[in-house]
Amino acid sequence: MADELQLNSTSQNLLNQVAHYFQGDVQVQFIGTFKSGTVRHDQAQVIQNGQQLLVQVSDLTAPDFVVTHEILHLLMTLRGFPKIYFPLTTDDHQLDNQLQYFGTELFDIILHLVVYPEQRRHGLITPEIEAAYVRGVRQLITPEIGKLDNEMIKRLVVIIDALVLLGPTLGDYRSVFEQNFPMATAAAQHLYQKNHSETN
C-alpha cells in the first residue's frame, strides 16, 4: 500500500524546489502502512545520507500534510534560515536535555508561523487535518489536574503551536482546549497575543 501511495502536485512541486537547492537525490520514503488517525510532527523526519535526502514518513494518516511540512522546514534551512544551536551547558545533563527540547520546540513554532500559512495557502490544512491535529495534541499532553504539575510547560508549548495552526481563538476546538487545559490555554493565548501585538 505504501509503495502505491502518490503525493499530490503540491508535494511534488515542493520536492522539486528542494532538488533545486540541494545538489543530490531527494526522495520520500513511506515506512509501513500505519494510520493513527492523528497528525503529529513526529510522523516524519528528514535524514541525510551523503548526497541523499530522505523524507521518511511513518504514519499515512495525512501524507501530503506531513511531507510538505517537513519539506517546507527543509526549504527554509536550504535557503539560509537561521539554525538553532546549544553551545552552553548547565552541567546538569537532564536539565540540558529539557532546555534543548523546549528550545527546539519554541524554535519550530517560530518556523510554523511561515510553514502553516504556506500549507493552508495550498489547501493542505483542511477541517479533517485540523481534527487529526487536535487528536494528536490530546495524545501528546494530558488534561490538567487543577494545579501546576511537571507537564505544564509541555502543555504550554504544544498549545502555542496549536494557536499558530488553528488561530488565536482555536477555532472549532476552543472548548476542547479550555475544558482540558484551561491554565495552559489561557497562558498560551496571553503569550501568543502579546507577541502578535508586538510584531504588528
Image (cartoon, helix red, strand yellow):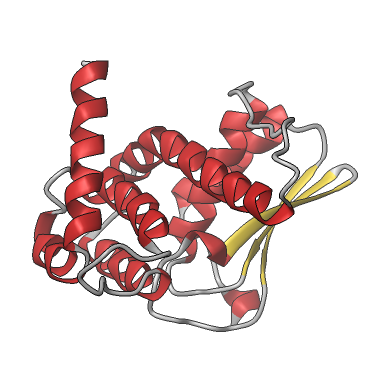
In the image, is 168 to the left or to the right of 32?
left
Regarding residue 115, the answer to whether it shows in the image is: yes
In the image, is 62 to the left or to the right of 123?
right
- Which residue does the image show at 46% across and 41% down from the upper left? 106
For the image shown, how many numbered marks are present on the structure? 0
In the picture, residue 118 is in which quadrant? top left
- Which residue does the image show at 12% across and 54% down from the upper left? 171
- Which residue does the image show at 61% across and 39% down from the upper left? 74
* Residue 160 x/y as whole percent: 31, 47
* Residue 24 x/y as whole percent: 82, 39
Regarding residue 54, the answer to whether it shows in the image is: no
* Residue 182 x/y as whole percent: 16, 61
Quarter the C terminus occupies: top left
In the image, is 104 to the left or to the right of 176?
right
Quarter the N terminus occupies: bottom right
* Residue 159 x/y as whole percent: 30, 54
- Depth order, front residue of 3/32: 32
- Which residue does the image show at 11% across and 60% down from the upper left? 174
Q: In the rendered view, tell whether residue 66 sits above or below residue 132.
A: above
In the image, is 82 to the left or to the right of 106?
right
